[in-house]
Amino acid sequence: MFHPLSAYVGLRYVRARSHKFFVSFITWVSLTGVCVGVAALIVILSVMNGFEDELRDRLLALSSDARVVTAPGARQLTAADWAAASRAVASVRGVTGVAPYLEAQVLAVSAPEMLPVTLRGIDPRAEGSVTQVARVVKDGKLAELTPGSDRAIIGEAVAQQLAIGPGDTMTLLIPTLLPDGTPAPKLRQLTVAGLFEAGLEENADSLVFANLADVRALGVAPSGEGLHVRFADPLAAPRLAERIRGVLPAGLQIIDWTSDNAGYFRAIRIEKTMMSLILLLIVAVAAFNIVAMLVMVVNDKRTDIAILRTFGASPSRVMGVFITQGLTIGWLGVALGVILGVVLALNVQTLVPVLEHTFHFQILSPDVYYDTEIPSDLHGWNVALIAAAALVLTTAATLYPALRAARTPPADALRYE
């Protein structure tokens, strides 16, 4: 099919200026459409990858890559059991940190306001090995959460709702049970030692950090006890969790961050898939334009086709002429789109402020969004997949016109010449 003669004639048709303006116009529209569609796909997916990375970083700032907890229905473990589990988890290859924690749902009160929060007891010395809490803390330090100090670090959103700040006190209402099962809530005052801001409303509104020993002293139910685990590669969490599952003592289970936050990332994957399909329609429309353009060229070149056939050119060589022409236009558009898309994706954070300043608008308003910068993370496999899909579409677009050209009867084409 791709005989040198077919390639030569096809490339001449690409370079030749058609005497019909509409054919030339459709040719340029097709090339531009493919280019714009491919570039838009690369840029949009890179931006969505950037937002996904930002979300993951913010989620993992306050939580670990995985957590080891008591399995439903299992017996309550002793301190020795937890120590043994911690050593077993730390011995697994790929684990870089293990730290204990204890959580409880309590009611924070600062008259006249009250707010349900999650009280998390941590070991300040070990917490840095499993989470990035210390990085988001301001107006205080984790080191101030010493045993017996009754100090806490709270989120800025919690502080605003309770109208308190560093140095103020807040009262915690802790639900506890007597040995006979009778509810016996306890009250305990904690001093606010600092604030944190993670940029996630769900976490900032509900977390209060205190020393692990202080939380235990409150009589919190041991069912909230567990281990936070940090991996060398957070993206390998599901695979590493399987390794840990094999060394855990009976009665314990491990939950990695991808399971805890599956809803967030499932929504992002669905959005990325739908956005890709929608933007791929731009390339599809450009491919239809290639079909229309080649059909018009075939009708315009019926005489040339007939002459080629009378000189002995086979139908497959005639097909090759128009496939060459269509592929040259389509693949050139894909190549230009890849170049343009990669350049834009790598410079999104530079170009967006320029556009906002020039046209006097802001894409991400600070009144609505915590972070107003648009991130971008270019993945090579995304670029390759987009280019391959566009090449398939543009290649398919050349088949019908080429077949139509190959089936043109020479006698009919030359009858009125």
Image: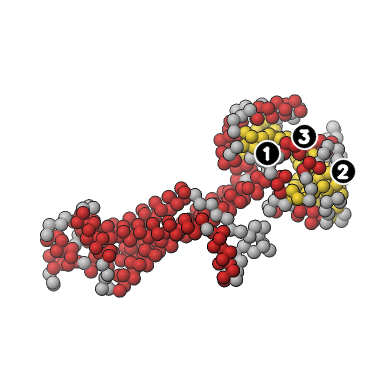
* Numbered disc 3: secondary structure: helix
Label pair 1/2, CB-CB below 8 angstroms: no
Say which residue label 1 marks: 130
Measured along the vertical axis of the image, is residue 253 above or below residue 190?
above
Task: Name the residue: 56% across, 60% down.
Answer: 350
Q: Which x, y percent locates residue 356?
A: 58, 67
Q: Amino acid at mark 2?
A: Arg
Q: Amino acid at mark 1?
A: Val
Cα gap from disc 2 to disc 3, whole angstroms: 18 Å
Sequence order check: which comes first, mark 1 or mark 2?
A: 1
Drawn side of residue 21 relative to residue 85, left or right: left
Q: Is residue 400 left or right of residue 50?
A: left
Label located before the other in sequence (2 or 3): 2
Question: Looking at the image, is 155 positioned above or below residue 20?
Answer: above
Question: Residue 328: x, y in percent?
Answer: 31, 59
Q: What is the quadrant of residue 286 in the picture?
A: bottom left
Label 2 Cα neighbours within 10 Å, binned few <14 / some 14-19 / many ≥20: few
- Please tell me how many numbered marks the rendered image carries: 3
Residue corresponding to mark 2: 188
Q: Which mark is residue 222?
A: 3
In the rendering, at what x and y percent does residue 4 appear? 21, 54
Who is closer to the viewer here, 69 or 191?
Answer: 191
Circles 1 and 3 in contact, beta carbons < 8 Å = no
**Image height check: is 90 above or below 13?**
above
Give the number of the mark in front: 1 or 3.
1
